[in-house]
Image: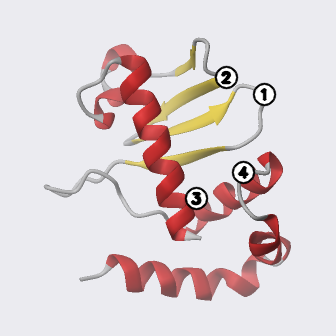
């Protein structure tokens, strides 16, 4: 799940850089880009929040919410359980990922919380 999330996050960041002509994805947090905006002609929109951004399809399907890191030398913050669950629900609804892989997690999130949090800890602690 985390690999899928990272792939979608990278694609969303690239979309923002390309459409908004940014030097770095984090530049979406500048004052002039703050708020909710449609990315004209793409079918996507974004909404900034705190240190992050939520990139969604304008039809309400799919998308990803991610934060930028506050640590030097690290662009993105690792996902938390909530963002992974939101990503799974949106992606299954949008049919952009294999739903069979994620439906059990969506159907019983509490059962999978420990598994996902252990995977997050394993992947993001050094």
Circle 2 crowding by C-alpha within 10 Å: few under 14, some 14–19, many from 20 = few
Label 3 sits on residue? 83
Label 4 sits on residue? 96
Q: Name the secondary structure under disc 4.
A: loop
Q: Are marks 2 and 1 in contact (CB under 8 Å)?
A: yes
Q: Name the secondary structure under disc 1.
A: loop
Q: Which tag, 4 or 2, sits closer to the chain's start?
A: 2
Quarter of the image that includes the C terminus: bottom left
Q: CA–CA distance between discs 2 and 1?
A: 7 Å
- Mark 1 or 3, which is nearer the eye? 1
Q: Which tag, 2 or 1, sits closer to the chain's start?
A: 2
Which labelled disc corresponds to residue 59? 1
Q: Which residue is at 53% across, 81% downward?
A: 117
Label 2 sits on residue? 43
Which labelled disc corresponds to residue 69? none
Q: Which residue is at 48% across, 43% downward?
A: 11
């Amino acid at each position: 799940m985390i690999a899928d999330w990272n792939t979608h996050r990278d694609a969303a960041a690239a979309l923002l850089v390309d459409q908004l002509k940014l030097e770095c994805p984090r530049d979406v947090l500048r004052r002039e880009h703050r708020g909710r905006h449609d990315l004209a002609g793409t079918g996507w929109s974004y909404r900034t929040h705190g240190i992050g951004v939520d990139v969604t399809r304008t039809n309400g399907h799919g998308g990803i919410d991610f934060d930028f890191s506050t640590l030097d030398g690290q662009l993105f913050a690792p996902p938390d359980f909530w963002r992974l669950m939101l990503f799974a629900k949106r992606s299954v609804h949008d049919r952009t990922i294999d739903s069979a892989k994620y439906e059990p997690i969506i159907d019983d999130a509490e059962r999978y919380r420990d598994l996902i949090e252990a995977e997050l800890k394993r992947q993001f602690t050094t």
